[in-house]
Amino acid sequence: MQVLYVCCGDSTEFSQSHQGESWIKLFLKMKDYLLVSICDPDLCEQGLAILHNFLTADSIKFQVYEDSREIYSKSLELLYQGESNLCKDKFLEYMNTRVLNRLGSGDATPSGDNSLRKFYKGLL
């Protein structure tokens, strides 16, 4: 996971649109591991950061949505059937801060990636 995080943990790495096909190939090879990592207390934080970068990269996000929907749904079931409160808390924090763009007061900011919100709405 650490090697993947070094490669994919920085969202600016995805800005090179001519590398979109390579990023998709990497995602397809690693998606099972990546999506299950959200259930592991040692990996969930890095896994969510990497996943977020794939889900928000303009050049590949719609293909990532399509290719991850089924296994991501199963991973979330596994997460919430499991016993790791740390992973559940990290996922909730991710949803509130990165997906819904909520501030400490609970108010949503007007900015954000609407397609990401739609993806999660359809997933959950």
Image: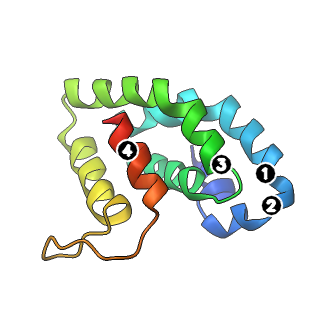
Question: What residue is pinned by disc 3?
Answer: 3
Q: Which residue is mark 1?
A: 20
Camera-near label (3 vs 4) is 4
Instruction: Please name the residue that numbered disc 4 is placed on.
Output: 120
Q: Is the residue marked by circle 2 packed among few (<14), some (14-19), or many (20+) residues within 10 Å?
A: some
Q: Quadrant of the N terminus?
A: top right
Q: Amino acid at mark 1?
A: Gly
Identify the residue at image location x=36%, y=59%.
99
> Is 52 placed left or right of 42 in the picture?
right
Instruction: Determine the residue located farthest toward the right in the rendered image.
Output: 18
| Disc 2 to disc 4: CB gap under 8 Å | no
Of callouts 1 and 3, the N-terminal one? 3
Q: Quadrant of residue 97?
A: bottom left
Q: Residue at x 54, y 30 (%)?
A: 33
In the rendered image, which residue does mark 2 sit on?
Answer: 17
Q: Check disc 4 and report its element: helix, strand or loop.
A: helix
Residue 114's place in the image compared with 68, above or below, is below
Identify the residue shown where x is 53% and y is 36%: 34
Q: Relative to the observer, which residue lies in front, 3 or 64?
A: 64
